[in-house]
């Protein structure tokens, strides 16, 4: 039962352009969402989060958008840099089970110089 | 570096042996979480612990796996009688336990290989 899905296994973008990573979820109880970035042989690094009471959160080059009616969130990276090349995971949790995050399968982002 | 520490980074065990994975949370964090990542998959929640308490172990396999977070010392994930299917990366995360618990900070992981 895959409650959080990242349907694109990979994404390739030119340096300086926008990267858009997508994530869909099925559990309407999720009320906060996070994006993590992961390099090989390292642990995930927290990037940005959003709670269900918002539809947008911005932090520097990273913006997360949440569409609750569509059960969809996206991460925009503008402008993309080669150092952004990594695996990106979206994750979700509920207020009644703090701590238990459900992760998507990940999207490999490659930013070409 | 006061980040989450895990050791060992790599662990090789033969089938039937025991594996012990250790996790020291970030300074000031009192909540610890364990996740497992199988090849080509996302991270799967295993267990959520506070000092001396298991809060949520709904992701733990029913047999052979156990976790603890004692009053003193690191959190331990223990796998008894390992099988090849236990080969995976095991990640520990921690959070402050003061509200923003969903912002979990991960360690570098322990890569377990069962031969």
Image (cartoon, coloured by chain):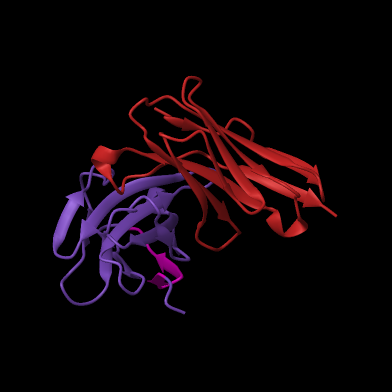
Image height of B93 relative to B24, above or below? above
Nearest the viewer among B20 and B49 is B49
Chain B shown in which color?
Answer: purple
Q: Position of residue B35 (x, y in %)?
A: 37, 52
Residue that extends furthest to the top in the rendered view of this protein? A69
Let me know if residue A43 is in the magenta part: no
Quarter-of-image position of residue A93: top left
> Do we see residue B115 in this rendering?
no
Q: Position of residue B103 (x, y in %)?
A: 40, 54
Q: Residue at x 65, y 45 (%)?
A: A108
Q: Position of residue A26 (x, y in %)?
A: 42, 24
Q: Position of residue B75 (x, y in %)?
A: 26, 67
- Residues rendered magenta in the picture: B4-15
Query: In the image, is B110 to the left or to the right of B54?
Result: right
Q: Residue at x 27, y 73 (%)?
A: B74
Q: Chain coloured red: which letter?
A: A
Let me know if residue B5 is in the magenta part: yes
Residue that extends furthest to the bottom in the rendered view of this protein? B1
């Amino acid at each position: 039962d895959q409650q959080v899905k990242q349907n694109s296994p990979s994404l390739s973008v030119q340096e300086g352009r926008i990267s858009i990573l997508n994530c869909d979820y099925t559990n309407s109880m999720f009320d906060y969402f996070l994006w993590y970035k992961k390099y090989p042989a390292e642990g995930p690094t927290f990037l940005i989060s959003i709670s269900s009471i918002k539809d947008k959160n911005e932090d520097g080059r990273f913006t997360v958008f949440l569409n609750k009616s569509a059960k969809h969130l996206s991460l925009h990276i503008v402008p993309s840099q080669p150092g952004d090349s990594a695996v990106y995971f979206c994750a979700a949790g509920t207020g009644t089970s703090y701590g238990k995050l459900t992760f998507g399968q990940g999207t490999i982002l490659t930013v070409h110089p | 570096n006061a980040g989450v520490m895990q050791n060992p980074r790599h662990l090789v065990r033969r089938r039937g042996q025991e594996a012990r994975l250790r996790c020291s949370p970030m300074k000031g964090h009192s909540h610890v979480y364990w996740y497992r990542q199988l090849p080509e998959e996302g991270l799967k929640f295993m267990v959520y612990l506070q000092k001396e308490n298991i809060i949520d172990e709904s992701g733990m396999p029913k047999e052979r796996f156990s976790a603890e977070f004692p009053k003193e010392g690191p959190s331990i994930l223990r796998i008894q009688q390992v099988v090849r299917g236990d080969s995976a990366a095991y990640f520990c995360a921690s959070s402050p336990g003061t509200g923003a618990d969903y912002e979990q900070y991960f360690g570098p992981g322990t890569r377990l290989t069962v031969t």
